[in-house]
Image (spheres, rainbow, N blue to C red):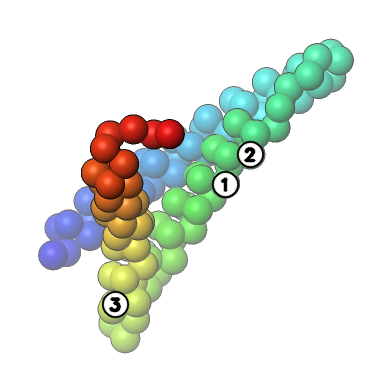
Amino acid sequence: MKTIIKFLLIGYGITAVYFLYLAAINLFVYFANTSKGFYEPFLPAGRNLAIGVIFALITGFSWFLLRQPSYQKAGTILIYSPLILIGLFICWFLIVMISSGGKWN
């Protein structure tokens, strides 16, 4: 169990660093293009920044909670919550695809 949690912490940390790196690059492009007068949407930079911050917060808070013996259950719930949300999304997607006969519209 602790090995899985360590892998999840490392995976969430790498994911946070990746999305924050993408956000930094997109912010550079956004400010460079807007300073030259070109239109550049803020959506890619903002989306990557939000995802990176969310994963960084989940990683930091769960690591802090897992270090405290009295809060280990809360840390475990927090670290498994993204996986649970992904599983629920996959179940929803399968239900929608099966009930619609494989058509989107």
Labelled pair 3, 2 in contact (Cβ < 8 Å): no
In the rendered image, residue 40, in percent from the top left (x then y), is placed at 73, 22
Q: Earlier in the sequence, mark 3 or mark 2?
A: 2
Labelled pair 1, 2 in contact (Cβ < 8 Å): yes
- Crowding at dot 3, Cα within 10 Å, few <14 / some 14-19 / many 20+, comes out as some
In the rendered image, residue 3, in percent from the top left (x then y), is placed at 15, 58
Residue 72 image label? 3
Amino acid type at circle 3 is Gln
- Crowding at dot 2, Cα within 10 Å, few <14 / some 14-19 / many 20+, comes out as some
Report the Cα–Cα distance between label 3 and label 1.
26 Å
Residue that carries the numbered disc 2 in the rendered image: 46
On screen, residue 75 above or below 6: below
Report the Cα–Cα distance between label 3 and label 2.
32 Å
Asked which quadrant contains residue 9, the reply is: bottom left
Residue 50 image label? 1
What is the total number of numbered labels drawn onto the structure image? 3
